[in-house]
Image (spheres, helix red, strand yellow):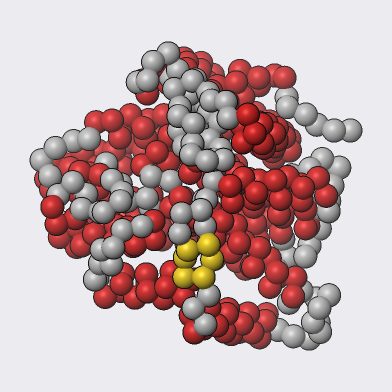
């Protein structure tokens, strides 16, 4: 028996859909008039009225980060970027809605919420192909250049990020659960990434495919059972290093819509510049993102690792010594979070790394843990596809929260067994 979207929670799903379409579904061009931002506070009031105790720790952590940020903002720059606290508040609302669904649905959450995300993904793919052909637009968003697709997102990059994130789930359900339809969905989603020239999203998805290929290559079906896990890990690391050397030595290039990217330059030169603290200063998506990370680390050091305050990285890039040639924001939410929250961000990242090591240990026996590890790695690139608009890319965050919430012993599809790899 198939489990579709639970009708008892249609109100929550409807508000989440309004969040996904936040850039277009609004009364005016102002973000404050979007349907999601007007409706969601009322829904949250109702949810909290039913039981606020389960969200106490969430509120405690949220307010700790916000108060800390207010203090560091006043100390370092003497100003507060109020709109970013509003962005954080609406992300908190989205988290509470999804957390509420998980608490109320119990074991059916994984299946039901995936069905919801999957239906949105199918709609984006079908509507995307229609937009590519007929060039129609949604309200309050501009039509992309050439054959670009954005639908109700502000631009092509904002659509590419959640499609890439959902595409990674499709890869895993296709491979581990033999869902051929998800393989077709992945191909269609990847085609849209290519049409949108979403370089970093493509790299993030390609990285997931490469890791999955190595997992298949070193699975028990391909190698002797007596081969230890440490030996498999060493062999994989040697192959990865060999591939990096191959790409660098032969200067392999890939053409995208606007220009070509040298993979050796991307892999080696960017990291070399970051380690040395020397900016590239030549513009372009890769160079500007690299320079932004360098600027963030410099300001983090100048703030004695306290951080410069929530949202102040955007102000930082208006200063003459930190100007990017072709970007106005960092395009890297992880580096931005580190720069703005300092020690608190370091503590948060330490906790996340601890959870990742936990799932790495289980990844050889449980593909949900494997999915979480691969998604975390790919998210580094996928999230860098977006500008500061990632704070309003509620679909990307919904997918990320969903993957975090999946229990290792649950199934994404009903009536399927979560088999070991």
Q: Is residue 407 visible?
A: no
Residue at coordinates 21% horizontally, 38% vertically from top-left? 70
Q: Position of residue 300 (x, y in %)?
A: 22, 58
On screen, residue 218 versus residue 326, left or right, reads right
Q: Nearer the viewer, residue 140 or 116?
A: 140
Q: Nearer the viewer, residue 146 or 418?
A: 146
Q: In what quadrant of the picture does the C terminus appear?
A: bottom right
Q: Is residue 81 above or below residue 45?
A: below
Q: Nearer the viewer, residue 217 or 354?
A: 217
Q: Residue at x 80, y 31 (%)?
A: 3
Quarter where residue 160 is shown: top right
Q: Position of residue 37 (x, y in %)?
A: 43, 21
**Residue at the location (19% across, 55% down)?**
322
Residue 163: image quadrant is: top right
Q: Give the image location of residue 127, x and y in percent.
A: 65, 31
**Position of residue 261 in the picture relative to residue 127 (left or right):** left
In this picture, is 127 found above or below 318?
A: above
Taking the view exactly as shown, the residue that stands out farthest to the right is 1
Left or right of residue 345, residue 161 in this image: right
- In percent of the image, x 43 and y 52: which residue is there? 384
């Amino acid at each position: 028996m198939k489990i579709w979207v639970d009708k008892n929670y249609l109100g929550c799903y409807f508000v989440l859909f309004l969040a996904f379409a936040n850039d277009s579904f609004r009364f005016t061009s102002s973000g404050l008039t979007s349907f999601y931002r007007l409706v969601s506070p009322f829904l949250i009031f109702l949810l909290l009225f039913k039981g606020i105790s389960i969200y106490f720790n969430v509120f405690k952590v949220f307010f700790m980060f916000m108060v800390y940020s207010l203090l560091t903002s006043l100390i370092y720059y003497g100003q507060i970027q109020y709109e970013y606290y509003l962005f954080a508040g609406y992300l908190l609302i989205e988290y509470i809605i999804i957390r509420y669904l998980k608490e109320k649905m119990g074991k059916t959450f994984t299946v039901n919420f995936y069905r919801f995300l999957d239906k949105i993904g199918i709609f984006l793919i079908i509507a995307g192909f229609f937009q590519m052909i007929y060039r129609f637009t949604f309200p309050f968003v501009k039509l992309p250049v050439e054959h670009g697709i954005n639908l109700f997102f502000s631009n092509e990059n904002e659509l590419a990020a959640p499609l890439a994130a959902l595409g990674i789930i499709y890869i895993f359900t296709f491979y581990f659960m033999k869902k051929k339809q998800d393989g077709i969905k992945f191909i269609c989603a990847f085609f849209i990434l290519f049409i949108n020239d979403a370089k970093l999203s493509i790299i993030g998805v390609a990285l997931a495919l490469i890791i999955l290929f190595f997992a298949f290559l070193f699975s028990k079906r391909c190698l002797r059972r007596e081969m230890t896990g440490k030996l498999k890990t060493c062999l994989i690391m040697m192959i990865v290093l060999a591939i990096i050397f191959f790409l660098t030595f032969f200067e392999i290039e890939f053409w995208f819509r606007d220009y070509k990217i040298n993979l050796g330059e991307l892999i080696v030169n960017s990291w070399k510049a970051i380690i040395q603290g020397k900016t590239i200063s030549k513009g372009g998506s890769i160079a500007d993102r690299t320079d932004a990370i360098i600027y963030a680390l410099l300001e983090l050091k100048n703030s004695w690792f306290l951080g410069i305050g929530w949202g102040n990285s955007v102000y930082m890039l208006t200063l003459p010594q930190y100007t990017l040639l072709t970007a106005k924001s960092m395009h890297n939410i992880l580096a931005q979070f580190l720069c703005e929250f300092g020690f608190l961000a370091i503590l948060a990242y330490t906790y996340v790394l601890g959870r990742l090591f936990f799932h790495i240990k289980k990844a050889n026996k449980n593909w949900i843990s494997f999915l979480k590890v691969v998604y975390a790695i790919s998210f580094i690139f996928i999230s860098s596809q977006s500008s500061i608009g990632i704070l309003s890319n509620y679909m990307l965050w919904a997918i990320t929260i969903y993957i975090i919430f999946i229990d290792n012993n649950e199934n994404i599809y009903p009536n399927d067994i979560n088999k070991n790899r």
